[in-house]
Amino acid sequence: MPDKKTHKTSVGGQALIEGVMMRGPKGIATAVRKPDGEILTEYHEFKSLGAKNKFFALPLVRGVVGFIESMMIGYKCISYSAEVSGMEEIEEAEMSKFEKWLDDKLGDKLMNVIMVISSILGFALAAFIFLFLPNLIFKGLNELTGNKVLEPFRGAIEGTLKIIIFVVYMILISQMKDIKRVFMYHGAEHKTICCYESGKPLTVANVNQCTRFHPRCGTSFMFVMLILSIFVVTVLSIFVPESLKQQPVLWTLIKLPLIPIIMALGYEFIRYAGRHENLLVRILSAPGLWMQRITTKEPTYDIIECGIEALKAVITDNPEDDEIK
């Protein structure tokens, strides 16, 4: 069978519980392995805010909008995969009396409540770990060295601390048995897209030979954001009075509005990296690609099958339909 034309696809995905989600230009597909071994594949048409309103498709704006959409879609798909794979039944069997009471009282609304609470707690935890904690550590180091020696390098030091915290966190959670399996599905997602982009037929054998590292991965996006934050915070610190920077809580609050800006810049770079291969892309993508050695694992054949089924559901016979514009 002749290979198709090699291209850079806009299709992206996400690892689920015993499955893979793929998102194409016109819709979303999930392929989840059921307890009986069958793969349940479902496709849903989806129109992003950027497709509905040109404002949300503008450069910089689209990065923030896309991130929020991805978080919402990802959460729903993970919840769905937990139900299909049988994980939800196991969790229900292990529910405490209080959890069962909540489920009886709230029913379907319980998941929405949990989603809101978990989102708030997740954002608060992320702000503490990546904004407050690095500043707190920097303040301690700064005081040990006389309060002035390290100040000119605040942005670089805080950024480096964020990267260290992120790497250590990912290494720790990667040791969990359930997370390791999710990372195998993450690897299958990348390898399947790589196979498709290389123009090879989507077979288990072809996908298995492809790399599990991809520049448009969310891991790379996180690393690009962390690197960009070094430069952005360095510039910001020039204009912020020293007295405010010495207050961890205030300095954290000052940096919070920078998150959408860093997120938007990071998205534009990842989008650019998906279309180009040059020295700048290779340098900025290198840390994220290295990190994928932790966040992706080599999948087994049955896991690869889920990646293939999900991808087949969102592509057409014409590869140009999903080219990165």
Image: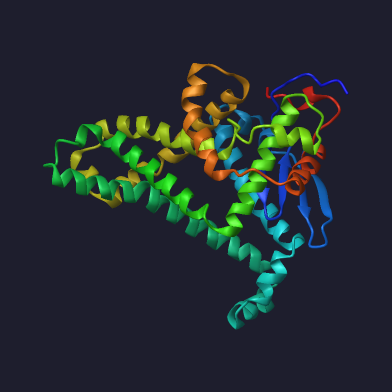
Return the x and y of residue 257 as percentages of the image width and height.
41, 41
- Horizontally, residue 261 falls left or right of residue 131, namely right
Camera-nearest residue between 262 and 284: 284
Residue 107 seen in this snapshot: yes
- Horizontally, residue 216 falls left or right of residue 166, namely right
Camera-nearest residue between 258 and 92: 92
Quarter of the image that includes the N terminus: top right
Q: Residue at 27% of width from left, 34% of height from top?
A: 237
Camera-nearest residue between 5 and 267: 5
Return the x and y of residue 116 as percentages of the image width and height.
57, 60
Q: Residue furthest bottom?
A: 97
Camera-nearest residue between 62 and 299: 299
Return the x and y of residue 40 as percentages of the image width and height.
82, 53
- Horizontally, residue 161 falls left or right of residue 261, namely left
Quarter of the image that includes the C terminus: top right
Q: How is the image coloured?
A: rainbow
Q: Residue at 82% of width from left, 49% of height from top?
A: 41
Up/down of 96 relative to 68, above or below:
below
Q: How many marks?
A: 0
Q: Residue furthest left?
A: 146
Q: Residue at 73% of width from left, 30% of height from top?
A: 195
Q: Residue furthest top?
A: 278
Return the x and y of residue 75 as percentages of the image width and height.
64, 53
User: On the image, which quarter does residue 108 sit in?
Assistant: bottom right
User: On the image, which quarter does residue 226 sit in?
Assistant: top left
Up/down of 125 relative to 148, above or below:
below
Residue 26 seen in this snapshot: no
